[in-house]
Image (spheres, rainbow, N blue to C red):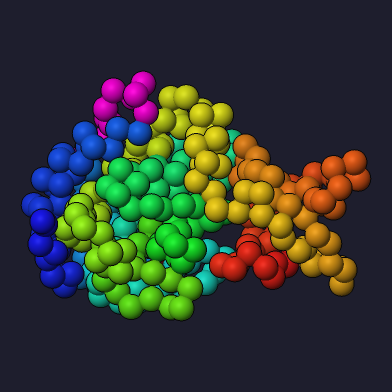
Amino acid sequence: MIQLTSPLRFDLNQLIIALSECRDQIRLDPELAQINEPPFKIHLFETVDSTNRVLWDLADQGIAEGTVAIALQQQSGRGQWGRQWQSPLGGLYLSVALTPNLLVENSAQLTLCSAWGIAAALRNYGIPVELKWLNDLVVEKSKLGGILTETRMQSGRVTQAVVGVGINWQNPVPPTGINLQEILKQQPNPQIASLEMLAAIALQGIIAGYQLYQQRGIEVILPRYQALLTSIGHRVTLHHSGAEQPARVTGISATGDLQVCLNGENPVLSTEISLEPGTISLGYDHSSNRT
Ligand code: BTN
């Protein structure tokens, strides 16, 4: 059985070893013989405001794809929709720079492929991760982590991106959250032994998802993402302009919109609509949702 190491230190050499060890286990697609990761250039920090912000600073000085920032804690961790991401010691806070070249309207695809890549990689290590639209990693209906993708564009195309991931490792979590220690202690043979190993799995997962997306397109990512989506088929109530409307989640569009069927109980009268990320929150009990 693997012994768990202390969360309060981070050994860069251990990360480098874990990156090469987990490359083979994270084979997410038989057609991708193995992950051809960019040469990772890793910047490790004790405390920063936000690893995403740090990478943008480095980007201003000109950085290559595969530059990574990892911090043991963040003082102003950024979450989705301008929220703060609580980032005490014991969690994983990691950002990676990518240089995609995609249409601005497809920018959510970066979150789709990264979220799927991390979830699929963790599943290879026995963690039953599912996805909550658009960017949440979920286990046992509780939030294990989240992804924040930030982009810069030129002439209508996304040319630079920072994919930031926060995963609850050993840190305290809010009532809707769960950390990996809680999950691993229920397992007879836990396979993730350290924060360094978790960082390696997350990093290789992001790169594997991104490479699969680049080589084979969103058409290949989408069904895999949807297969891990918790809310497919769930009934939701949309609150819109003072009225409540029953609906059923049917899927995700290629641009990352949530597709729902209004009047979900009656196929004859039903109408499918798309909701952009941020216009509705699915919550963690799938009961009260708003547009
Ligand atoms: C969410 O709201 O679910 C997304 C949270 C993303 C948090 C990570 S932690 C590393 C990176 N740096 C940040 O400031 N945010 C992301």
Query: Which residue occupies the extreme right position in the image?
Result: 269
Image point (15%, 51%), residue name: 15
Horizontal relation, residue 128 to residue 22: left or right: right
Image point (76%, 63%), residue name: 237
Count of numbered circles in the view: 0
Residue 209 versus residue 139 in the image, above or below: above
Tell me if residue 107 is in the magenta stretch.
no
Q: Nearer the viewer, residue 47 or 285?
A: 285
Residue 288 figure quarter: bottom right
Where, quadrant-wise, is the C terminus in this rendering? bottom right
Where, quadrant-wise, is the N terminus in this rendering? bottom left
Magenta residues span: 29-39
Residue 21 versus residue 141 in the image, above or below: above
Image point (55%, 35%), residue name: 223
Q: Nearer the viewer, residue 154 or 245?
A: 245
**Residue 164 at what x, y percent from top left?**
39, 56
Q: Nearer the viewer, residue 265 or 148?
A: 265
Horizontal relation, residue 160 to residue 191: left or right: right
Look at the image and tell me whether residue 43 can be seen.
Answer: no
Residue 222 figure quarter: top right
Horizontal relation, residue 201 to residue 83: left or right: left
